[in-house]
Amino acid sequence: MARPLSPDYDKRKENILQHSAELFAEVGYHKASIDQLAEASNITKSLIYHYFKSKQDILYQCMLNHVELLRSTARGCIDPNQSSEDQLQNILLQFLQIYETAGARHRILVNDLQQLLPEQKTEIIVIQNNITQIFKTLINKVAGSGDQDKNLDTARTFLLLSMINWTHTWFNADGTMTSQELGKLVYDIFVNGVARGSGTSHEP
Amino acid sequence: MARPLSPDYDKRKENILQHSAELFAEVGYHKASIDQLAEASNITKSLIYHYFKSKQDILYQCMLNHVELLRSTARGCIDPNQSSEDQLQNILLQFLQIYETAGARHRILVNDLQQLLPEQKTEIIVIQNNITQIFKTLINKVAGSGDQDKNLDTARTFLLLSMINWTHTWFNADGTMTSQELGKLVYDIFVNGVARGSGTSHEP
DNA sequence: TAATTAATTGTCCAGTCAGTCAACTAATGT
DNA sequence: ACATTAGTTGACTGACTGGACAATTAATTA
């Protein structure tokens, strides 16, 4: 019975989120001012407060969107019709591809999680734990579970995640290696090691 | 011919650096105020400017100290009397041990490198590259160099570094795994993989 | 002691920031 | 037509911050 939300509401909100994520990643959460976020999004500062209730809220929604995308992607990779090896390789490829396009969001998730309210932080971590669990299950199928040694399972899961989560610090997709090749390399090293690994496995 | 620097000068400076690093790591560089740094160091705000010329200078020296320690440690691990395998395993253990005690410095190095002046940032990166090169040389000896495929050498070097550089996000030394055991696990996965890896290799 | 410089403190300031507010315009339903 | 709410803006503010500074005390040497 009054003016409804614009049909572009979500689109505009997403636009702010995207530009904000890039600025946060570039200069850091606290150094990025609301004025800068507004300028980058081509709107006024006040309008930002029409879409978000606080600066922190922007950060929170950036992170939430990102981890939810990762989780749904991970869940989509669970496919009983595929071998565990193929599923693991597939999930690695897809995550690396997301990191390539959503690099800014990934970086702020790494750098600024502590800037969230405890309850927000917890919510993000819960989702991350869901993702970790999916990886762990797959890894245990590929490598064989350490059964009574739960700590080994956990450690090697995090070590695999390390390899893909750290790529933003060095990997350049414009370079001589694609994220596809990188994904295969990560899989190969993790499963077979560099000593007995294929090294340059260039069969498609 | 006048009052010289206190013999404790370096010690007091280091004390400020240590407390600052912890605060930077905990709340983030920009959110940590000089007043907070002073309070944590049990001195006044003004006195900080006696030892450092700016807030940024504190951050810079935190990072510089840290990477210089890492580089000298890495260089100390080069020992022609040892096998490449032993050298690699040794350097992994020592780095993980440093990360355990200097966790705060490691985190700010990861999070806040971008807050430095370009020239300072470059200086830190040069030292990091020195360290990376040491790792790369060792890895090539252990795994065999990809000769014409320089990119493979680089990628797998960073992938190994990923595993130890990411530990601060999940590894808890108070837990059921020591950094020694973690070091061995990292080495074993990287060289042999999880499929043919020893898993729980509990021989001393 | 006189000169010099390190060590330390409390105070002050210019600038910045997140967030508020009043006001206006643009849609929509009744 | 009219009430209601969305969309948007510029002006404003109170709090805070990094850094400057003047002043004081302490240590060292000549």
Image (cartoon, coloured by chain):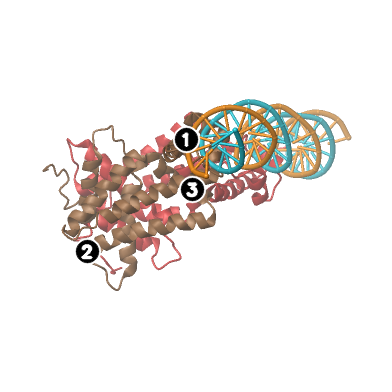
Chain colours: A brown, B red, C orange, D cyan
| Crowd rating for badge 2 (residues with CA inside 10 Å; few <14, some 14–19, many 20+) | few
* Mark 1, secondary structure of its residue: helix
Chain ID at mark 1:
A
Say what amino acid the circle numbered 2 marks. Lys
Q: Do the residues bearing badges 1 and 2 touch, measured as CB atoms within 8 Å? A: no
Say what amino acid the circle numbered 3 marks. Tyr
Q: In which quarter of the image is the C terminus of chain A?
A: top left
Q: Mark 1 points at which residue?
A: A23
Tell me what residue is drawn at x 39 percent, y 60 percent.
B179
Residue D1, how many percent across, how many down?
A: 60, 33
Whichever of callouts 1 and 2 sits on the residue coming sooner in the sequence is 1
Q: Mark 3 points at which residue?
A: A60
* Mark 2, secondary structure of its residue: helix
In this orientation, which residue lies closer to the viewer: A184 or D28?
A184
Residue B187, how many percent across, how many down?
A: 28, 56
Residues tagged by mark 1 and mark 2 found on one chain of the structure: yes
Chain ID at mark 3:
A
In this orientation, which residue lies closer to the viewer: D9 or B127?
D9
Whichever of callouts 2 and 3 sits on the residue coming sooner in the sequence is 3
Residues tagged by mark 2 and mark 3 found on one chain of the structure: yes
Chain ID at mark 2:
A
Query: Is A179 positioned to the left or the right of C24 in the image?
Result: left
